[in-house]
Amino acid sequence: MQNNIISGLFVGQNFVTLKEVDSTNNFLKHLVSNSKPVIEGTVIMAENQYAGRGQQQNTWNAEAGKNLTFSILLKPHFLEVTNQFDLIRVVSLGVFDALEPLLGDALKIKWPNDIYFGDLKLGGMLIENMIQGGQIKNAIVGIGLNVNQEVFGPSLPNATSLKQILHQDYDLKALLSEICRHVEAWYLNLRAGKTEDVRKVYLSRLYWLNEMRWFKTAGGIINGKVKNVCYNGLLVIENTNNEELEFSLKEIEFLNR
Ligand code: BTN
């Protein structure tokens, strides 16, 4: 345990840096399952993550030493399992608020939890909830953010980094500290019952909100607007007949054309 860089009440107060690990989410999950109690807010950061995992069984590739790959342990016992999407909201908002002073208006949250600058992906998160007895016992909040990486391979055509956007290097631990501070603030808002505020602000930060765009769905390609996100995380698209359609992550793809 070491920490002289992360301020705040509990997120990052127990801070561990690893030179190399398969996945910080895996590491934290094993720690929670195998050993003595691990305190809420523990952060595991890796300089090199060689088998990082992304959403929908994808891999997460990040050049060693140049990016942020870390996981936070949260214990949202207060949160109903049916409202677990609120955790995605607060973490997305925390990352957003940490980056907004650097990136301004082009920064967006692409539903459900990608961090976008313009049409390019800057980061993402993988939140794995461990549910026991109808309660979220532990949430492993994995965050990957492209920071000082200058080149992305052809398999990542829509990736970008702070370095590509702002042409300077950033101190990884200073940035991590800002993210922890803002995630903690939003998490405490949720814990204090400010759910409507969390949902409203999350919605207002969304990529393509109220813009007429194209989407690929099982029923074909549709034209419509991002209108809302249900309490349970389903995306609401209003089509050209003013009908509201709801989609899960596997059921819809955003089309840039
Ligand atoms: C995505 O956009 O697909 C989610 C990417 C999440 C990547 C992070 S990096 C730290 C943590 N450990 C992992 O294996 N994945 C998450």
Image (spheres, grey):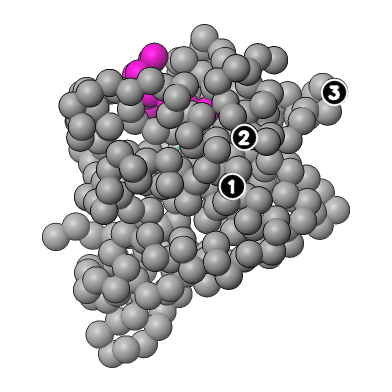
Residue at 65% in and 51% down: 188
For the residues bearing labels 2 and 1, Cβ distance under 8 angstroms: no
Badge 2 amino acid: Gly
Badge 1 amino acid: Ala
Residue 89 appears at what percent x and percent y? 52, 56
Q: Label 3 vs label 1: CA separation?
A: 27 Å
Residue identified by numbered label 2: 8
Badge 3 amino acid: Lys
Q: Label 3 vs label 2: CA separation?
A: 24 Å
Residue identified by numbered label 3: 36
Callout in the foreground (3, 1): 1
- Up the image or down, 50 lies above or below 37; here it is above
Q: Which residues are magenta?
A: 60-70
Residue 123 appears at what percent x and percent y? 38, 39
Instruction: Bin the neighbour count of mark 1 within 10 Å (Cα to Cα): few under 14, some 14-19, many 20 and up.
Output: some
Residue at 28% in and 43% down: 103
Residue identified by numbered label 1: 185
* SS label for mark 2: loop
Residue 219 vs residue 136, the one in the foreground: 136
Quadrant for the N terminus in the image:
top right
Residue 116 located within the stretch drawn in magenta = no
